[in-house]
Image: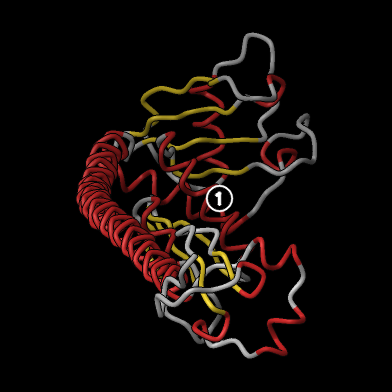
């Protein structure tokens, strides 16, 4: 048997047998001294591999390792590219959604502005209609506090009241209207002209008479004579009084059919035309 390295003859007991290439070598031809060789067990010798085979193994292992690393790098690169593509797609989707949201906001703002404009126009139309309606009532007054009597003649009652106030006015017609309290229905009286109406309202507010001062058999409750207001204006007056009270206003009154407010003696008078004007009460 010859050594696979030096080709000299070797004794089997002094040689090493490579389990990979099945070749025998002198132990010293494989760089092993006598002492190290002597300490090798049979089991170690049975698994021994020569230096050439080890080198080949390492090269194969290195190549395999490099190949595995290349595969890992490729997979990582592919994953990064995939995520990048997905992220780009996500950005496009988000951008599209943001643009759509902006368009919706713009449309909503335009609709809001249009609605505000329409609301203002509607309110202005209501105000103009109310002014016309109120104009049609310019010769009428409403009287509260007069007790209901059987077979009463409302026109005669109003005429009697005007005479008590020393006002010579021509009452065209008068009638009761239903209120929440059926026992205290208002009397609506139509006079011949606006001047008579103003004098009657002014004198009634100046005297502030109770019912029994007009007629002895009437109760002592107060009688109030005011301008006859439209439903729209009565509601606006109620809202004005309510809000003015909340805001600490001292004065709310009617000048003819105009609603006026004033916070105190040191502030200017404000006219309330419609519900939009309620924003002036601050």
Residue placed most toward the observer, 160 or 190 = 190
Where residue 120 appears, as percent x and y from the top left, is: 26, 49
Q: Is residue 216 above or below residue 26?
A: above
Q: Is residue 106 visible?
A: no
Total marks in image: 1
Q: Is residue 39 above or below residue 73?
A: below
Residue placed most toward the observer, 80 or 50 = 50
- Asked which secondary structure carries label 1, the reply is helix
Q: Is residue 120 above or below residue 243?
A: above
Residue that badge 1 annotates: 204
The type of colouring in the image is: secondary structure
Question: In this image, 46 relative to 172: left or right?
Answer: right
Question: In this image, 242 relative to 116: left or right?
Answer: right
What is the crowding at mark 1: few (fewer than 14 residues within 10 Å), some, or many (at least 20)? Answer: some
Identify the residue at horizontal 28%, vertical 53% (top origin): 82
Question: In this image, 274 relative to 124: left or right?
Answer: right
Where residue 126 appears, as percent x and y from the top left, is: 28, 39
Identify the residue at horizontal 39%, vertical 39% (top origin): 169
Q: Is residue 264 visible?
A: yes
Residue placed most toward the observer, 131 or 257 = 131
Residue placed most toward the observer, 17 or 271 = 17
Identify the residue at horizontal 40%, vertical 65% (top origin): 65
Identify the residue at horizontal 39%, vertical 35% (top origin): 140
Where residue 149 appears, as percent x and y from the top left, is: 69, 17
Q: Is residue 54 above or below residue 178?
A: below
- Residue reaching furthest top? 151
Q: Quadrant of residue 132?
A: top left
Where residue 85 appears, as percent x and y from the top left, is: 24, 54
């Amino acid at each position: 048997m010859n050594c696979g390295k030096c080709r000299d003859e070797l004794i089997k007991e002094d040689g090493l047998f490579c389990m990979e290439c099945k070749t025998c070598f002198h132990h010293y031809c494989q760089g092993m001294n006598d002492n190290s060789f002597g300490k090798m067990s049979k089991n170690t010798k049975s698994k021994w591999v020569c230096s050439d085979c080890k080198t080949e193994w390492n090269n194969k292992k290195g190549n395999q390792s490099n190949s595995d690393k290349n595969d890992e790098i490729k997979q990582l690169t592919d994953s990064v590219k995939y995520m990048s593509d997905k992220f780009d797609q996500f950005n496009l989707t988000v951008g599209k959604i943001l643009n759509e949201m902006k368009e919706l906001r713009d449309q909503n703002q335009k609709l809001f502005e249009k609605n505000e404009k329409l609301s203002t126009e509607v309110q202005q139309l209501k105000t103009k209609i109310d002014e016309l309606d109120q104009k049609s009532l310019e010769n009428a007054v409403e009287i509260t506090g007069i007790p209901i009597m059987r077979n009463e003649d409302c026109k005669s009652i109003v005429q009697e009241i005007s005479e008590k106030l020393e006002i010579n006015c021509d009452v065209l017609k008068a009638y009761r209207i239903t209120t929440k309290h059926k026992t205290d229905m208002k009397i609506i009286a139509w006079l011949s002209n606006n001047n008579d109406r103003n004098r009657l309202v002014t004198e009634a507010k100046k005297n502030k008479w109770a019912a029994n001062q007009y007629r002895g058999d009437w109760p002592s409750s107060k009688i109030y004579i005011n301008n006859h207001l439209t439903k729209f204006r009565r509601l606006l007056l109620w809202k004005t009084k309510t809000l003015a009270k909340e805001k600490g206003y001292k004065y709310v009154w009617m000048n003819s059919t105009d609603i006026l407010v004033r916070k105190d003696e040191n502030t200017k008078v404000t006219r309330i035309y419609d519900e939009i004007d309620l924003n002036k009460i601050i």
